[in-house]
Amino acid sequence: MELKKEYYPLFSKKTLSYIKESENNSLSLLKSDKAYCFMCQKEMDAREIKHYKSSNGKETSLCPHCGLPTIICSSSMLDCSASSLMQVKKDITDHCYVYASVLLDTVDAYVDKKIDQSEETEALFL
């Protein structure tokens, strides 16, 4: 999840570590069995991830369920328990204007059918 540095003071150190770990993570995925999305809270096989957002030669994975660039790999040293992922999600969604800027790219991915076309995914945008 690419955030402008000006937003960093809004988040806890824990949340920032998850955000940074979710950026430029295509190589980390190759070393991982599992992946976790800290926004839609899904656990998945790392090989389910097929779409990436490219920026400056770096590739950031997009969640196949919600389309957000918020994937943490099992090879990371971060806690991927449900309670930790929920805490990070809450910290991010408490700052809705930051979250909204990330959602714009996700809506485009949904329209382009790059992410799961389900009622559950659609509910994220409403």
Image (spheres, rainbow, N blue to C red):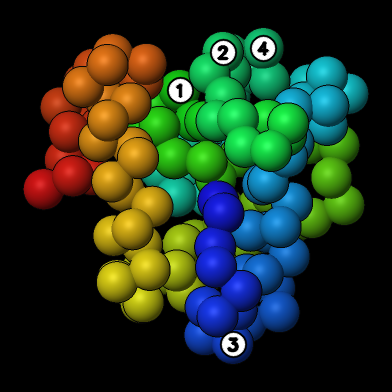
Do residues under tags 1 and 2 come within 8 Å of each other at their CB atoms? yes
Badge 1 is on which residue? 64
Disc 3 is placed on an element classified as: helix
How far apart in space, not on screen, are marks 2 and 3 (Cα)? Answer: 32 Å
Left or right of 31, for residue 36: left
Badge 3 is on which residue? 9
Left or right of 119, for residue 62: right
Badge 4 is on which residue? 47
Badge 3 amino acid: Pro
Disc number placed over residue 50 in the picture, else none: 2
Badge 2 amino acid: Lys
User: Foreground mark, 3 or 1?
Assistant: 3
Do residues under tags 4 and 3 come within 8 Å of each other at their CB atoms? no
Task: Return the residue nearer the eye: 58 or 48.
Answer: 58
Disc 4 is placed on an element classified as: helix
The x and y percentages for residue 53 are 55, 30
Left or right of 63, for residue 76: right
The x and y percentages for residue 26 are 74, 27
How far apart in space, not on screen, are marks 4 and 3 (Cα)? Answer: 34 Å
Badge 1 amino acid: Pro
How far apart in space, not on screen, are marks 2 and 4 (Cα)? Answer: 7 Å
Q: In the figure, 112 relative to 21: above or below?
A: above
Q: Earlier in the sequence, mark 4 or mark 3?
A: 3
Residue appearing at x 47%, y 74% in the figure: 91
Q: In the figure, 13 relative to 59: above or below?
A: below
Residue appearing at x 83%, y 31% in the figure: 28
